[in-house]
Image: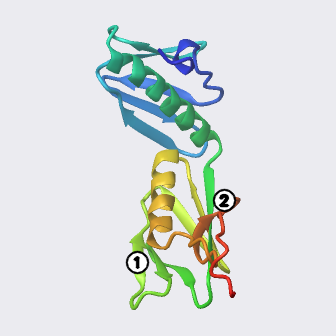
Amino acid sequence: MSRLAKKPIPVGKTTVSMAGTTLSVAGAKGTLTKTVHGAVEIAVTPEGVTIVPRDNSRLAKALSGTFASHVKNMVAGVETPYVKKLILDGVGYRMEVKGKDVVLTVGFSHTVPLAIPEDVSAKVEKNVLTLESINKESLGQFAANIRRVKPPEPYLGKGIHYEGEVIRRKQGKKAV
């Protein structure tokens, strides 16, 4: 069993409730819900949220740690939203927010529109896209989808990368 799941997860000012197989976490910034797998049991106590495997199977033990991490992320997200910044490097490369889409111009013969999920807000300043959401899972997936359009290449470093990400650069050809 996971070490995360052995201790109760403190909830602070958030309210956590279980209704059937649905876990709800409500806080100052919003409400998140998640369906709980049948192999784990989640109990809300005054000390916090406890996750216990229903049986001694390998799946139940693995899912107890996974759901402990999900609950921690949900509680932290409704208190302070998660933020990811994506930086676009390259001559002539642009990104902009048009309505409910992020439109990327990254050297292809066409622009690449990507639909922004409902729980994610996006804004562009110069060539830096700032994504913000209370749901860590959807924020990370959307940022990964944007980065997948044009990942940074190792010779010139052109492409989309996360803020603080280190790009391993290659030397290129040498003249004899």
* Residue positioned 59% across, 31% down in the render: 14
Horizontal side of 127 relative to 140 (left or right) equals right
Q: Which residue lies under the disc numbered 1?
A: 113
- Marks 2 and 1, the one that precedes in the sequence: 1
Badge 1 marks a residue whose secondary structure is strand
- What amino acid does circle 2 point to? Glu
- Given residues 160 and 10, the one toward you in this image is 160
* Residue positioned 47% across, 80% down in the render: 103
Tell me residue 55's x, y (percent).
32, 8
The vertical placement of 10 against 159, above or below, is above
Horizontal side of 31 relative to 110 (left or right) equals right
Badge 2 marks a residue whose secondary structure is loop
Horizontal side of 132 relative to 174 (left or right) equals left
* Residue positioned 45% across, 72% down in the render: 149
Q: Which residue lies under the disc numbered 2?
A: 165
- What amino acid does circle 1 point to? Pro
Screen quadrant of the C terminus: bottom right
Contact between labelled residues 1 and 2, with CB atoms less than 8 Å apart = no
- Other-residue count near label 2 (Cα within 10 Å), few / some / many at <14 / 14–19 / ≥20: few
